[in-house]
Image (cartoon, rainbow, N blue to C red):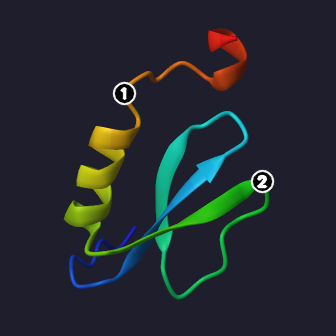
């Protein structure tokens, strides 16, 4: 897969509070909600590293 560092990404989160990044020019995939965090891949991954501290799915934390 082509990895372009100049591309803009959006942070997305699913119902299990799991995070990922998604190309900002595409709608979030089914089951994922776009968060108001958009930018370079490194900035989005940095946000995820600080926000997603418990990697267990939400259903396992309850």
User: From the viewer's perspective, is residue 40 above or below residue 52?
Assistant: below
Identify the residue at image location x=31%, y=83%: 7
* Neighbour tally class for label 1: few under 14, some 14-19, many 20 plus, Cα within 10 Å: few
Residue 30, horizontal then vertical, whole percent:
79, 61
Name the image quarter holding residue 34.
bottom right
Give the percent coordinates (x, y) of residue 40. Answer: 25, 74
Which residue is label 1 attached to?
53
Count of numbered tags: 2
How far across and how far down the image is residue 33, in percent? Answer: 67, 61
6 vs 11: above or below? below
Q: CA distance from mark 1 to mark 2?
A: 21 Å
- Camera-side residue of 54 and 40: 54
Residue in the picture at 62% in, 12% down: 61
In this image, 6 relative to 9: left or right? left
Look at the picture and state if 50 lies above or below 34: above
Q: Say which mark, if any, is on residue 31.
A: 2
Q: Residues within 10 Å of mark 2 (few under 14, many from 20)?
A: few
**Figure quadrant of residue 21:** bottom left
Q: Is residue 53 left or right of residue 36?
A: left
Residue 4 image position (x, y, % from top left):
27, 79
């Amino acid at each position: 897969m082509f990895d372009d560092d100049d591309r803009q990404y959006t942070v997305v989160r699913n119902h299990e509070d799991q995070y990922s990044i998604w190309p900002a020019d595409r709608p979030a995939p089914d089951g994922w909600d776009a968060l108001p965090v958009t930018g370079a891949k490194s900035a989005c991954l940095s946000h995820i590293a600080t926000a997603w501290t418990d990697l267990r799915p939400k259903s396992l934390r309850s």
